[in-house]
Image (tube, rainbow, N blue to C red):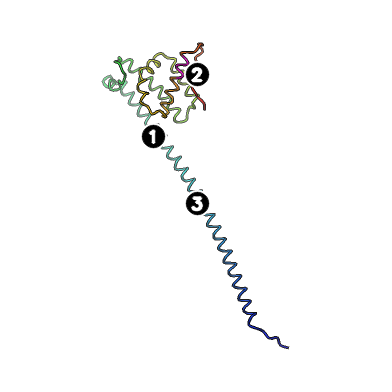
Amino acid sequence: MVTQRTGNRGLSAVTAALVLSVTGTTASLFAYRRTVETLLRANAELLRRLDLVEEQRREAVRRADRVEYQRDHRNLLLTAVADPDLLPVLDAYERDLPPQVQKQYLFANTLYVHALHGYRVGLLNRGELLGHVRVLFQNPTMRAYWEATRHHRASLPYDSDEAELGRMTDDLLAELDDADTDEWWVVGDGGAED
């Protein structure tokens, strides 16, 4: 006997094929979407890292510029100290000083700025910086320089490294003057936390 076929069976096969096709396409779209989202997250992370590298590069350039600026400063001071005609150009004190004292003060400034620069470029931490300052200011010429340049420090921006070190130095000198001990090397912490 022959079985009669109806057209519905063909339609079921087409429907099944369409369902499989739509399901496959939907799965492909979801996979595509997950891939795109993963790529976007990776791209965002890459951009974040590139920004970090760029900031590190800018900081390295700032440090190199600071080192070069410090070198220029030292060379200008050396030029003025070597030439008696140029020395008066750097006389920014509130009273007349003989050339010998001006040279001593310029050298004192160079020592002080050298310590500050070591801190700025990361060669010294705050405690080490304070230790340098503590030693430097055992000398009476350094103390006289510090007093003669007080008005210079008054013009510094309050939050600058140099202004902070100036306040730290002022505090240390006051503690040294008030100390009941001759052991100056143990006086004052000056807030020198690392």
As drawn, the label of residue 43 is 3
> Which range is magenta?
171-176
Residue type at numbered disc 3? Asn
Residue 76 falls in image quadrant: top left
Question: Marks 3 and 2, Cα distance to the nearest angstrom?
Answer: 51 Å
Say which element carries label 2: loop
Residue type at numbered disc 2? Gly
Q: Which residue is drawn at 70% across and 86% down?
A: 3
Question: Marks 1 and 2, Cα distance to the nearest angstrom?
Answer: 33 Å
Is 1 placed left or right of 185 in the picture?
right
Which quadrant would the N terminus be assigned to in this image? bottom right
Q: Which residue is drawn at 44% across and 30% down?
A: 120
Q: How crowded is mark 2: few (under 14 residues within 10 Å), some or many (20 or more)?
A: many
Percent across and percent down for residue 43 are 50, 51
Q: Which residue is drawn at 40% across and 16% down?
A: 143
Callout in the foreground (3, 2): 2
Q: Which mark sits nearer the N-terminus, 1 or 2? A: 1
Say which element carries label 3: helix
Callout in the foreground (3, 1): 3
